[in-house]
Every structure is written in C-alpha cells, then in structure tokens.
Amino acid sequence: MSSAPGKASKRKGHFSDDSKRDKKSKKINYWKSASSTIHPGVSGIFVTCNRNHEKQCAQELMDLFNEEAEKQINFDDVAADDEEYDVKKNKEDVEAAVMKELAGLSKTKDKNLFTPVNIDCECVLFFRTKKPVDPTSFVHALCTHALESGTKSTRHTLRLSPVALTAPATAEDLIALTNKIIPLYFGGHKDDDSAPSFKFAIRPTIRNHNTLTREQVIQLVAANVGSRHSVDLTSYDRLIIIECFKNIVGMSVVPGDFEKLKRFNLQQIFESTEAAKDATSE
C-alpha cells in the first residue's frame, strides 16, 4: 500500500523518470507562449542558464518559482490583481500598501505571478513578476532556502538577478530610477543626515547595450546614493544591482549576504552544499 507523497518526496523525485512521464502530458510550453519584450515600469528576474537550454530553464523555473511562491505567499489572503507593481516613495508606504491589499484579497492560485520573456539573448532570459511578488525579497528567500536545504531543484539555471523596477536606458531615466529605488533601502532621502549610513557597492551588468558604459552607470548611481553612505566593495551592507539590456535598465538593492548566497547562483549554491556534505562525511 502506498501513501500520498509529501513535499519532501516530491522534491526528491523532481528529476526521476516517473516524474517526467507523469508530467509530460500536463506540461505547459511556457517558452512557446513567452512574450518577447521587456517594457519600462515592470519588475522581474533576469536569469542566466546553460547554453542552448533556455526553454528547459524557463520550464524548470516556472515550477520552482510557483513552488517557492506557495511558501512565501499566503494564498488564502491573495486574489487576482493584474495591476503592475508600483514603487512608492518610501519603504513604509510600500509595506503599508501591500499589507492593506493582502488583507482584502480573496483566495486564488491562478495569478500568473511569473511570465517568461524570450528576449532572444543566448543563455539569458527574463521573468516578469506581478505583485505581491517582490523580486528582491523573493530571490533572496529562494536562494536562502536552497542553501539551507541543499536540495538540487534545477538543472540548467545559473544566476538569478532580481529587478525591482525597469526604466528606459538613458542617463536621465537611470537617475530617476535611482531616486525611486535607493530611498527604499538606504533609509530615506540622500540629503537626510539624521538617517543611518550604510556601506555599499554597485554591480552593473551590461548586455546588448551600447548607450551607457559601466563607468557611467557606476558614477551616476553613486552620485545619487548620497554622501553619508560609503563605498565598500568587499564588506558592504547593501549591493546595488544594475541590469542594462538593450533599451531598458533595471535596478534592485540586495542585502550584504549576497556573496554568502553565491551571488544568487543556484548551481553554485547546490555545489557548495554538496561540498559541505562531503566534508562532514569524511
């Protein structure tokens, strides 16, 4: 007599032949229906993957993201809402607005919180996210869970790069984007000397883009962080991630444990947990 499998057994059989056969007829080809454009004003997650496995990466991440969303989001309190995430002027407003919205929402699990975007870039894809998913906290929690569990749940996925908000990739729009995002994580307006100070670093990634250089991005963002904060490339409290791709630029701010979480690289997280297991078993 067989018993109903629990969550742990589902994860264990994630790549088993039986699992593949059971799911084959039910699989949705997310990549075939993926949109092809990243618009300004959206949030999401850039993903790097193994060469020629973009389709497989999109599929496995849809499964992983939806599973992770069930851990992070109370669907008893969440209802469908197609409005885009809107960055507020300060962190308190964001938290208050989200809590108020979640309190009045009805139950649903069919929110389509993650939409794969086929951006026609080798080894890179993008997932657009919808609220209540916050890409930064979502990716951080997902990588933390991966590190703690040591369970390998993806084959082709490499690094996840959250994007809190996108904007047109111009110097003017990058400055405006910085002024929207930075206060949420750096304790208020850059000229408020009474607010706390942080050590920070900036990590730009530029793909298929020739408008802004790496040096320009760093200088523009650093100038708008504020003088009370100091640059520290190794022991930072906050890391500002900038993603320049074609005609858009995206930004997020992640905590100082970015290196501990292997720069949000799932493959490296799994390899490190395996290495740690081997070391303890010797």
Image: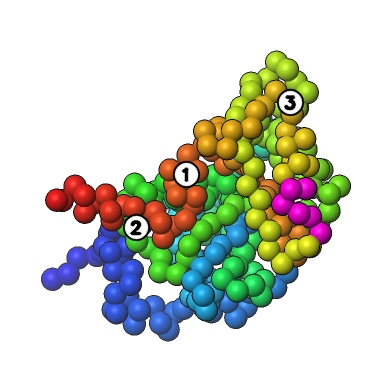
Measure the C-alpha gap from mark 2 to mark 3: 39 Å
The answer to if 142 sits in the magenta stretch is: no
Residue that carries the numbered disc 2 in the rendered image: 271
Q: In the figure, 28 relative to 236: above or below?
A: below
Report if residue 268 is visible in the image: yes
Residue 93 vs residue 120, the one in the foreground:
120
- Residue 240 percent across, percent down from the top left: 64, 42
Residue 60 vs residue 226, the one in the foreground:
226
Q: In the figure, 101 relative to 210: above or below?
A: above
| Residue type at tag 2 | Glu
Measure the C-alpha gap from mark 1 to mark 2: 14 Å
Which disc number belongs to residue 180? none
- Mark 3 lies on a secondary structure that is loop
| Residue type at tag 3 | Ser
Residue 233 vs residue 150, the one in the foreground:
233
Q: Which residues are magenta?
A: 211-216
Q: Residue at x 62, y 47 (%)?
A: 203
- Residue 23 percent across, percent down from the top left: 39, 78
Residue 130 in which image quadrant: bottom right
Residue that carries the numbered disc 1 in the rendered image: 259
- Mark 1 lies on a secondary structure that is loop
